[in-house]
Amino acid sequence: MYEQISHSLLNDILTEVKQPKGEDWQHFYTRLGANFYAIYSLFQHLYGQREDFKPQLASLVSVLSRQYAQRAPHLRLKDLEREKNHDWFMQQKLVGMALYCEGFAGNLANMKDKLAYLQELGVNLVHILPICDCPEQANDGGYAVRDFRKVDPRYGSMQDLEQLIAAMQQCDLLLTLDVVVNHTSDEHAWAINAKNGEQRYQDYYYMYPDRTVPDMFEASMPEVFPEHAPGSFTFNAETGKWVMTVFNNYQWDLNYSNPAVLIEIVDIILFWANKGVDILRLDAVAFLWKKIGSASQNEREAHLILQLLKDCCQVTAPGVIFIAEAIVAPLEIIKYFGEDAVNAKECEIAYNATFMALLWDAVATKNTVLLTNGVRDLPEKLDRATWLNYVRCHDDIGLGFSDQAIIASGFEPVSHRRFLVDYYTGQYPDSNARGFAFGVNRKTGDARISGALASLAGLETALANNDLPAIDNAILTILLLHNLIMSFGGIPLLYYGDSVGTLNNDGYLQDSSKMHDNRWVHRPTLDWDEMALRNEPGTVQQRLFSQIKQMIAIRKEISAFADLNNRELIDMVNPHLFAFHRYVQTGMHPKVVVIANFDVHPQRAALHLFKQKNLQKAEGTLIDLCSGQTVQIEDDAIILPKLTAYWLAA
């Protein structure tokens, strides 16, 4: 949009900074001109009251220009290609995996040797969890960053990463890396300078000489880690000041009311974009703006900051997209795509944590009423935005579905969440799950759940008891969950080790820096001898790997699985069943019905429910696209085996 005041200011800035010219810069100036009114408006809203508004804005433009000058020709070409194919990340061809480099391969150099495994499985998007330099002990699994531009020596060097990125590009594997935008380690250079009394860097954080302001903040701020990191402020003896530390006492929250902080983060984001990263996961975005008298989460200004980050990235590296790491309620998470928009103006991708939690609810209860109600309550996403659908990740399982949805499903919220925690920690009768309660709030009784997928699904207990039927049920549960994240709509994100049934690992208890955090139980170091069992017929590893591999391959051929707001729930009379319809206009299998049975017994689904969705083949033989098997039909009803989902072509 052209607007005289903002573009007059831009002309002044470009004149003062003496920007480069030439054919290589035409795309930069086109994008800068197209985005500048939005950048100016957002920057003015956040910082317009400051006397240094204009020089700070000039500094931001300078960063965009400098990083564009450093952007490699092949990345500039990729930017142009993705601008033409702007929904490239919404097609059904993408399947991701999240992994810790150290646990998956040992280090970045060894990662190159494991790319063949990822290709064998069919994964073509890899999220390597935090690899930036962190302190040896106080690092929160890599999310307490000491240097945003340095690879942690435990994983290798920047050269190792650059070689890995080059190898991945040759294999058409996309790379996702984290940028921790909410906080730094207290050993970061900014924090050290702040400790040394430099006011410039103290202004990068929230620092106060006494408890007056911290008490005002904490009166309305919920605790993130009430067990081991209560409160939101930590006293720093070196400065004699209280520092905001929402997560852990060694993670200092950045103060985005200071524009210098935002400009630093833009520079860091573009640094990684220029390394060849395709997708940047922005960590803890819900916490970016702090406000006395509020929860200091999901504030409007946090969204404005994300819009600024997006607009700036679109100027310099428009082929790079963002993931919002915001594990919040559905009505809040949808805002991280951007409100009052058609295309995403903040982050193009967000975690579908609600769907993940609802799936685990259905596994525990064998009942899909809450799953169906919860999915129905999910707001419709923007056109150019998509979900990451996952069963497990490096984090805990939060039971964040709404009380209203629980009540509407016939349960009482407090007792139902208590049941789920008891079920997945093995405290409930007849539960085979082996998980752990995490983040227990002694005041409220709330808790979240840690544990490996296979252990939560009952495989660990079944193997220990040599219980063959229970082993079968656990395998079927794991496959059922993967089936649904593949077909629901969005990018399926597998977690490393899950495709071969990796179990809980209690080795973290021997590490003093990890032993207080039971999430490490599901952050394994893979045993590649055990991984090799995926090729040995009849093993648990082979049964899981071969079928997940097949799901991935078939998913990529089903055009209806592209994420185009093209899903419609099907109301099922049977409370053990969950079903939805996926559809597009053209392509292979443009209409597909997905139906899942969460019970441990076969269930019936009346055919007339699917005839209403123009499932033409309902009159004759039906084939499950996923397995290739003929679907059993009796008395005008589909018979679904236990713990099974079908993909039925219309």
Image (tube, rainbow, N blue to C red):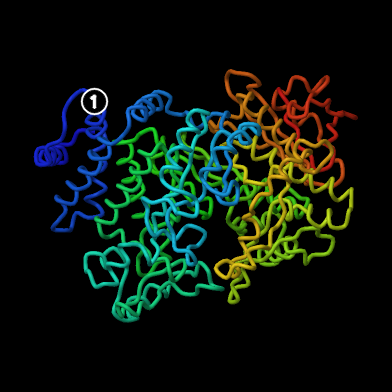
Task: Residue 182 in the image: state x and y as whole percent.
Answer: 39, 58
Residue 73 x/y as whole percent: 32, 27
Q: Choose top left, top right, bottom left or bottom right for residue 201.
A: bottom left
Of the pair 198 and 393, the residue shown nearer to us: 198
The location of residue 280, given as percent across then percent down, is 43, 43
**Left or right of 307, for residue 336:** right
**300 up-or-down from 96: above or below:** below
Measuring 83% from the left and 28% from the top, which residue is drawn there? 631
Given residues 135 and 356, the one toward you in this image is: 135
Q: Amino acid at mark 1?
A: Asp
Residue at image position (37%, 40%) is 273
Q: Helix, strand, or loop for circle 1?
A: helix
Please state the horizontal and vertical placement of residue 63, each as a whole percent of the image.
Answer: 24, 44
Q: Is residue 290 above or below residue 16?
A: below
Crowd around label 1: few <14 · some 14–19 · many ≥20 (10 Å)? few
Position of 482 with respect to 90 (left or right) is right
| Image quadrant where residue 6 sits | top left
Q: Quadrant of the N terminus?
A: top left
Residue named by callout 1: 24
Q: Nearer the viewer, residue 534 or 581?
A: 534
Is 394 displayed left or right of 237 in the figure? right
In this rendering, the count of numbered labels is: 1
Q: For the C terminus, which image quadrant? A: top right
Q: Is residue 444 above or below residue 44?
A: below
| Residue 301 lies in quadrant | bottom left
Q: Residue at x 50, y 51 (%)?
A: 155
